[in-house]
Amino acid sequence: MLIVNARLITWEEPNRILDDYGLFVENNVIKEMGPTAEILRQHPDPSPVDARGQFVLPGNICAHTHFYGAFARGMAIPGDAPRDFPEILRKLWWPLDKALTPEDIRSSALVCLVDAVRHGTTLLVDHHASPNAIDGSLDVIAEAVEESGLRAVLCYEVTDRDGPEKARAGIRENVRFIDKLNSEKQNHPLLSAAFGLHASLTLSAQTLDAARNAAPDGTGFHIHAAEGDADQLDSLAKYGKRVVNRLQDHGILGPKSILAHCVRVDEREIEVLAEAKNWVTHQPRSNMNNAVGVAPIEQMLKAGVRIGLGNDGFSNAMWEEWKTAYLVHKVWNRDPRRMPASEVAQMAVYNNAALAESFFTDLHLGKIAPGSAADLIFVDYHPFTPLTVDNLPWQIIFGFQESMVTTTIVGGKLLMRDRQLLTLDEEAISRKALELSTSVWKRYGNNLK
């Protein structure tokens, strides 16, 4: 692939913005970059991909999401609205995930993948749950991911809330899928795996130990932690220790493990996370929706905790998550100096890329440079003030919109060109999801009774 007439945003360190540049892509990676005229002289191509002066930058990465929650959109919860986060789990998410069949799992993944391609999110870290369809569920999602051409890190969310046999089945599904990818690595370049766990409040000591003992060497865990007060109160009441300390005692923390949210962590827990080189992901739209508070992200960053940006199943328009993170910390702290755009970019670009590389260890992700994966998006943004390396994060937060993404490329393969999807049939996928969601909602209602 030859890309010409681009305004490159490289997201190198230090970042560069390069006008009228071209990229030569070979074997899924960027081989050369230079001024368009020079690249065309070196690699004459009768039909290059013409960026037509658009910004070309690395695709967005989502550090924590839930494909399985797609069918919650527009679904009314019967009776009174949930009054707190535990009620949201009991009235919405747990009855919904029990309603999913393998066909529903595939459909809900596909609608999220369409959303990701359209909005320029090229890699997603998913956290799946389907208690009545556990065995093989990760294969179903993996097939959808490979069909889309995007990259994903997959896992199954182990929990005790449906009994010990299903907890054991969740552990087996994680181990099976991890072993499969390890043995067939060359056949699945778009996929990687973590070991999924739900949250401390639904995991016994026995199940945490069983998961730790079953996990293949080098595996990272992906778990919700201290998302709300209930998780901390449960851990303190049952075990006499806070969530992060409990997870540390069970060997769950480490440089490949992801703790989603960490809204209600204290200073000592933050120190433990930093010492363990553990990942934490921030999902501000979800935290606002669940009314659980705002995570102490700036404090964690200063302590050396590695923080990524996810969406927890909200739309895969990751710049919306940028904007929310930028704004919510200001209003939460009543201080306009909080969470500058540069820190949002640090999480969303540099940290997310480092997190992704810990799973895709043979790839260089998140920047435009020779040797990096050709995971790219074209953005039709026309600044009316000077756009510089220094003000780029603020230009993104106040100017970039998801509708401006026109082309999405992963590993040098076009997934969308000029807003036309090339790997997924959006109309057919949406039609099938609409058909299936009616039955899912009916089963959801029955699960509430």
Image: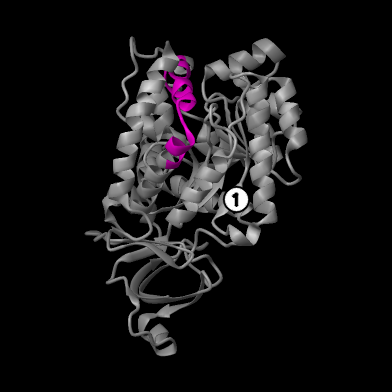
Work out whether residue 112 or residue 338 is closer to the camera in this orientation and state it. 112
Q: Residue furthest bottom?
A: 41
In the image, residue 75 sits, relative to residue 414, either above or below, namely: above
Q: Residue at x 53, y 59 (%)?
A: 365
Q: Position of residue 203 (x, y in %)?
A: 65, 22
Q: Which residue is mark 1?
A: 192
Seen at 30% across and 66% down, the residue is 54
Q: Which residues are the magenta region?
A: 87-106
Residue 177 left/right relative to 227 = right
Instruction: Classify mark 1: residues with Cα within 10 Å, few (<14), some (14-19) or many (20+).
Output: many
Where is the N terminus found, in terms of image quarters? bottom left
| Residue placed most toward the observer, 237 or 336 | 237
Residue 83 visible in image: yes
Residue at 68 percent across and 35 percent down: it is 172
Which residue is more in the foreground, 143 or 123?
A: 143
Left or right of 167, for residue 422: left
